[in-house]
Amino acid sequence: MPSRKSPRKGSLQFWPRKRASKFLPRVNWNAIKGNDSTDAGKGLKGFICYKAGMASAFVKDVTEHSMTKGKRIIVPVTILECPPLKIFSVRFYRKGKPVKDVLVENLDKELKKKIKVPKKKGQKIEDVKVEYDNIKVICHSVVKKTNVKKTPDLSELGL
């Protein structure tokens, strides 16, 4: 409980102080742009990766006005493991709201652990006759190739 002499325990930078509702973050894919104007609009704008561990690396310090400039220093580094991604569905948007979802024909068995997989086959992308502004892809990670966990993560990635 806060008291008059000590009104707050902890920083408001990490607020609210509770467990995250989702493991994967939300990303505004419209704000992310490609490096070149020729490269814009090609490929996925993100991927799913997992933290595998930490390590130490020897690097040369290039920071100006540093006491260790030009010397080799030890820096902590994070090791990430990036499993391959598979496409689950393609989602069409109009004015920021989803209009149509098209599922892939061959779905993995591992997806049954995460979501309820439909039994009937869906429409093909060529047959979609819907007006749309934006297309996003719902991908899932193939985590059976890693030692991180057993259930795949679903994430919506921008194109």
Image (tube, rainbow, N blue to C red):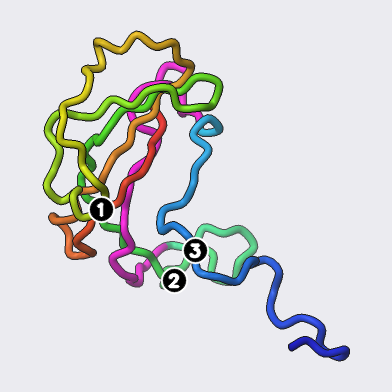
Badge 3 or badge 2: first in the primary sequence: 3
Q: Residue 142 colored magenta?
A: no
Residue type at mark 3: give it.
Answer: Ala
Kindly report which numbered mark, 3 or 1, lies closer to the viewer in this rendering: 1
> Is residue 9 shown left or right of residue 69?
right
Snapshot quadrant of residue 107 = top left
Give the vertical position of 30 relative to 141 (above or below).
above
Which residue carries the number 2 mark? Answer: 73
Label 1 neighbour load within 10 Å: few <14, some 14-19, many 20+: few
Q: Position of residue 138 (x, y in %)?
A: 33, 36
Residue type at mark 1: give it.
Answer: Lys
Q: Position of residue 65 (x, y in %)?
A: 64, 62
What is the magenta range?
Answer: 33-59
Q: CA distance from mark 1 to mark 2?
A: 44 Å
Kindly report which numbered mark, 3 or 2, lies closer to the viewer in this rendering: 3
Return the residue nearer the eye: 4 or 99.
99
Label of residue 114 in the image: 1
Q: Position of residue 57 (x, y in %)?
A: 35, 68
- Marks 3 and 1 close (CB-CB < 8 Å): no
Snapshot quadrant of residue 42 = top left
